[in-house]
Structures are given as structure tokens and as C-alpha cells.
Amino acid sequence: SPASMDSLSSSGVGGGGGSDSDKRQILEQLQQQTALNLIQSLVNTSTEKCFEKCVPSPGGELATSEQKCVSMCLDRYVETWNIVSKVYGSRIARESGGGGGGSSGISFQ
Amino acid sequence: MSWSSWFGGGSSGGSDKPASSDAYNDTSSFQYETVPSIGSSSSYGSSSGGTAEFQQQVQQQMLVAELQRRIGQLSGLCWEKCMTAYPKYSISSREENCVTNCAERYLDVSSLIAEGLAKKFEAS
């Protein structure tokens, strides 16, 4: 479930419209929350997948081979994420009526 | 926010990278790409219009969040279907095709389901 937005500060935006800086602050907080959610989801999913793949029989500690496996697994998972993200981007670009090709557009810095 | 600072420019410590890997083409660094219709994160700094524009920006951000959620979900699904081998130094082209097809076909199914359900709601 998406992280709650309780962390957003309450500024006087509900009434006649808050100041520009209030709006900017809220948008920035929204962005930060989105970023945090993304990272959390990546951590959770890759941990689960890589645990399944790399540690079939949990022992008293992680073997070096298992550690190496986890490291490579993480790379492969991020690559998978990138591929899926590209497919989504292209699909949305196509369906929004853009005549463009497969580029998924903007990359965040 | 700099994504590369979270994930680094390449594989995390411990794995030996093949000598031929090119750091700039490192596909395992996190390339966060998003949809063309959504502006870059710096666009919120410009002077605002009225409440309507603000609401639209908020909505856009919610859309981005939802999109990320779906990408994450689909990545997990396609991982299960396609990345069945023991993790290697790089993703094979077979695996890459599999993941691409997996995502594309999933979205096709998603469209079909949406259409199908829409019809059912119309009928009732």
C-alpha cells in the first residue's frame, strides 16, 4: 500500500489557495514521498527475489558465493526494472497519440 | 534527487565485472525513466498559476507514483517468468527478450481486461 501522506505538512492551502511557496513545498514533499516509496518497493522486491534465488538453504551465515549471487541478482533485477519501465513508457507514449517511436522519454537525473 | 547516488554507477561490491563492460553503458545502474507526458522534477519550481494548475501538478505526481507501483509489480512478475537461471554477470538477450515480451503482453492483457469489463458494466 502506498505510504501515507501524513508526513506532508499542513499549510493553509485548502482555503483561498496557498502561496506559491506553499504549493511548491507540497509538490516537493509529494515527489520525495514518491521517491521513498519507489526505493522501498525496490528494496523489498529485490530482497525477496534475491533471497529466493541465492539462499535456497539458509545456513549459519551467508556464504561468499551467496553474497556474490545477491550482488549480481540485484544488478539483474534493476536491469529487469529498466526494461519494464521502458516498455511502459513506450506504450504510454504510443497510446497518448504520440507518433513517436520506442523512446520512453525523460530520464530523471 | 540524484538516483545514481543511491545505486551507484554499477554493480554493488563483490561481483567481478567482465573486462569488456562499459561504465557508461552499464545497464545495471538505475536508469529511472518515466513517461514523456510528465515533466521533469525541476518543473515544479516555476511560478505557479492558479489552483487548477496546482491540482493538475498534484495529480501528475500521483500518476507517476501509480506508474512506478505498476512497473514494480510487473518487474516482479516478469522476473519470475523470465529470470529463472542463476544470476550471471549480465542479462542474456534471451532473458531480455523474455522480459520485454512479458511486459508487452501483460499490458495487452490489461487492455483487453479493461475493455471487457467496460462492456460488462455497460450491459448491466
Image (cartoon, coloured by chain):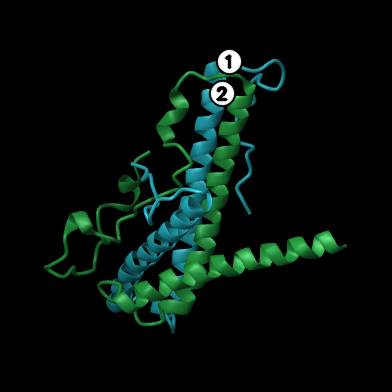
Chain colours: A cyan, B green
The residue depicted at 34 percent of the width and 54 percent of the height is B30
Contact between marks 2 and 1 (CB within 8 A): the answer is yes
Q: Secondary structure at mark 2?
A: helix
How many discs appear? 2
B65 or A83: nearer the eye? A83
Amino acid on which disc 2 is placed = Lys
Rendering coords of residue A95 (x, y %):
53, 53
The residue depicted at 48 percent of the width and 57 percent of the height is A91
Q: Which residue is mark 2?
A: A23
Left or right of B105? Residue B118 is right
Rendering coords of residue B68 (x, y %):
51, 52
User: Mark 2 packing: few (<14 Cα in 10 Å), some, or many (20+)?
Assistant: many
A30 or B104: nearer the eye? B104
Q: Which residue is mark 1?
A: A19
Question: Where is residue B18, by image quadrant?
Answer: bottom left
Q: CA distance from mark 2 to mark 1?
A: 6 Å
The residue depicted at 61 percent of the width and 50 percent of the height is A2
Q: Is residue A63 visible?
A: no
The residue depicted at 72 percent of the width and 18 percent of the height is A15
Q: Are the residues under marks 2 and 1 on the same chain?
A: yes
